[in-house]
Amino acid sequence: MTQDLSAIVGANNVLNDASSLLDYGRDWTRYYTPTPKAVVFPQSTEHVAQIVKWAFKNKISLVPSGGRTGLSGAAVAKNGEIVVSFAKMNRVLDFNETNMTITVEPGMITEALQNYVADKGYYFPVDFAARGSSQIGGNVATNAGGIKVVRYGLMRDWIAGLEVVTGTGEILQLNQGLIKNATGYDLRHLYIGSEGTLGFITKITLKYTHPPKPLSVLVLGVPDTESVMKVFSEFRQHTKLMAFELFTDKALATVLESHSELSKPFENPAPIYILVEYEKMNATADDEALSVFETCVEKGWVHDGVLSQSETQSKNFWALREFISEACSKYTPYKNDISVTISNVPAFMKQTNDVFNKAYPDLKVIWFGHIGDGNLHINILKPKELPMDEFVKRCQQVDALLFKTIQQFGGSISAEHGVGLSKKPFLHYTRSPQEIALMKSIKKVFDPANIINPGKVFD
């Protein structure tokens, strides 16, 4: 097997030592034991096509691997698959200022792309805490969102074209960077968010934009969930919002425990904190934002707040929000990433908190999220003395209660982390039987031998 792969990509681009198999065979989930047979590093689209044709002929399954920052098990190889890592396909292939597009290989790190575009005087706005390790191909495969969605939308909104390799080794050019293309089905949108189940993404043509004007950050203390969306409405109406993020007092405490260099934004504690980032469109933008803040205080929606006075302070405020996942990681948390419509966030949080208070009276539950687009992240922290299998089993039992609540609100069991393995048993809470049947039919068209990331999203 390794000899066949070495003949395609070279012997130095195939690994099968225990450490590499463990590292490349999993993502950030720790509930599954990775058991890949080998890791292969293609360096071109032609390599990928040859690997797929070999796997198709020999009925061997392949699992795509990017930055492995996923949280649903979509990049886990637990059944003897070959991991196809795109770590060595990380180049910029084209930068076109006329079209305002950049074409890159899937292994390019998100932050490297952002910096490359910034060095040219432009801006790529899809952004999240894992920017330093996530790869663009994975961002496409999960339709990544992150912290700027309220202003700039999802990854899908910035993809002008894709090159992909199907489950039979065919190479497809999808949309080729066109703005207008009314020639039938736009197949690139099937690959966006497909979690690597339809084939491999080998080139991505992305749009970029002009950088925003200088930004300011406010951190606000809010008394309850009902006030959160009232504050959101006020700031959305009167400022040019870039981000609107929520985190709880427990989330803040967890970050401060791990990062002594950070401090509370203000002395008076609050059960809920909101981070508001807005673009300073003119010289009076800060005054206008403070006027909104004062209105929110007068109406009882905000108890306290602080406005950044420097870029360093803005970064420190963002760190209170962005370091939450890292601070929780030492507790091996059980994570859920869900969404409801923006207007339903307060009622959903209240109802879900009632569920958690009954189900987890002895466990710490950490909430945070991109509240401006209805996306919430829930982290259940594992006590040291509780065995992992018991902890996961208990959390999965409560998942059913959580997802029933999401179903009642017409929400999604996965807002931006995908379905993978961990959400697969619960897909029916968001997708109808008819939708799931159609998705399975689409999978068969692009991957008739079921060798591309099999067992993910659905069986």
Image: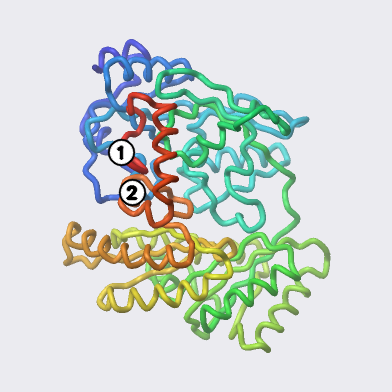
Residue at horizontal 38 percent and vertical 59 percent from the top: 336
Mark 1 residue crowding within 10 angstroms, few (<14) / some (14–19) / many (20+)? some
Point out residue 68 in the picture as x, y percentages from the top left corner.
38, 41
- Dot 1: what SS? loop
Residue at horizontal 70 percent and vertical 30 percent from the top: 181
Q: Nearer the viewer, residue 127 or 261?
A: 127
Instruction: Name the residue furthest right.
Output: 283
The label shown at residue 455 is 1
Q: Nearer the viewer, residue 132 or 429?
A: 429
Residue at horizontal 44 percent and vertical 67 percent from the top: 408
The label shown at residue 424 is 2
**Gap between marks 1 and 2 measured at Cα:** 9 Å
Mark 2 residue crowding within 10 angstroms, few (<14) / some (14–19) / many (20+)? some
Point out residue 122 in the picture as x, y percentages from the top left corner.
71, 42
Which amino acid, by three-letter code, is at mark 1? Gly
Q: Would residue 436 appear left or right of 156 to someone viewing this image? A: left
